[in-house]
Image: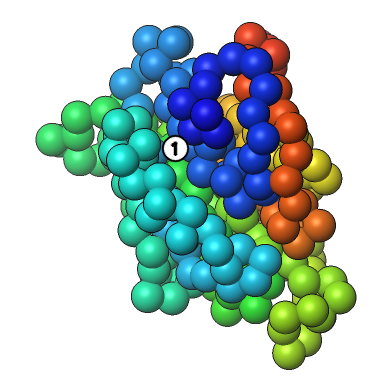
Amino acid sequence: DKYTLDSGRIFITGTQALVRLSLMQRRRDRELGLNTAGFISGYRGSPLGGFDLALWKAAHHLKDHNIEFKPGINEDLSVTAVWGSQQISLSPGATVQGVFSMWYGKGPGVDRSGDALKHANSAGTNPFGGVLALTGDDHACKSSTLAHQSEYALVDAFIPIMVPSTVQDVLDLGLLGWALSRYSGLWVGFKMLSDTVDTAASVIVDSSRLIIHQPQ
């Protein structure tokens, strides 16, 4: 049910909600008559250390929704791959209108990818694509050599930031984040803490629950 139910409530973890989020975006696009695809790339690290495992387990769901998961050799290369996904309009053989993408990495990965993030954000996003940049932050230094937070690095790259505080927020703010990215042409930071990722909750998944209004 966590990936297939279209209405009502499901019980889901924060990590699984990130997988579900990409499926929901594809469904919303399809309802709007948009021909889109999804792309996810990044480099594992707590609290997002299990994200790639959840994506591999949901591989057949991703395939059914035209979403490609390709983990990166490192954070910089995965940023560059996601950057390229927003340039679909430059490909004469493109089969979709846009690619909504998700990059993930923990705080030190954000630090080492600063140059790539700045250039990717400056290059912009596709109006039918958009990018969420998931930053796994470890404030308490629970599984890191240094405590870290990514707001300063994202602000330095002119990337706006969303901070989901519940599993429901992961779904709601995620959809709003992609809408913001498409409208503004910017990457959108999505700050993930272990308090949100490493928990589970009952959430509402009705597609009509969230109505997104585009500014005129």
Quadrant assignment, res 101: top left
The reply to whether residue 4 is visible in this rendering is: yes
Relative to residue 17, is residue 152 drawn left or right? right
Count of marks, rendered view: 1
- The crowding category of the residue bearing disc 1, from other C-alpha atoms within 10 Å (few below 14, some 14 to 19, many at least 20), is many
Q: Nearer the viewer, residue 14 or 157?
A: 14
Q: Residue at x 49, y 69 (%)?
A: 43
Residue 41: give x, y in percent of width and height: 42, 58
State the image coordinates of residue 145 (x, y, percent, origin top left): 73, 90
- Tell me what residue is drawn at x 36 percent, y 36 percent: 61
Residue 156 in view, yes or no:
no
Seen at 59% across and 15% down, the residue is 7
Where's residue 55, x and y in %? 44, 52
Residue placed most toward the observer, 74 or 8: 8
**Is 137 placed above or below 66 here?**
below
Furthest toward the bottom, the residue is 145
Assign a secondary structure to mark 1. strand
Residue of label 1: 100
**31 displayed left or right of 196:** left
Above or below residue 153? Residue 125 is above
Q: Residue furthest left?
A: 93
Color theme of the render = rainbow
User: On the rendered image, what quadrant is the C terminus found in?
Assistant: top right
Q: Position of residue 84 (x, y in %)?
A: 34, 52
Viewer-nearest residue: 17 or 187: 17
Of 211 and 126, nearer the camera is 211
Q: Which amino acid lies under the numbered mark 1 shown in the image of this protein?
A: Phe
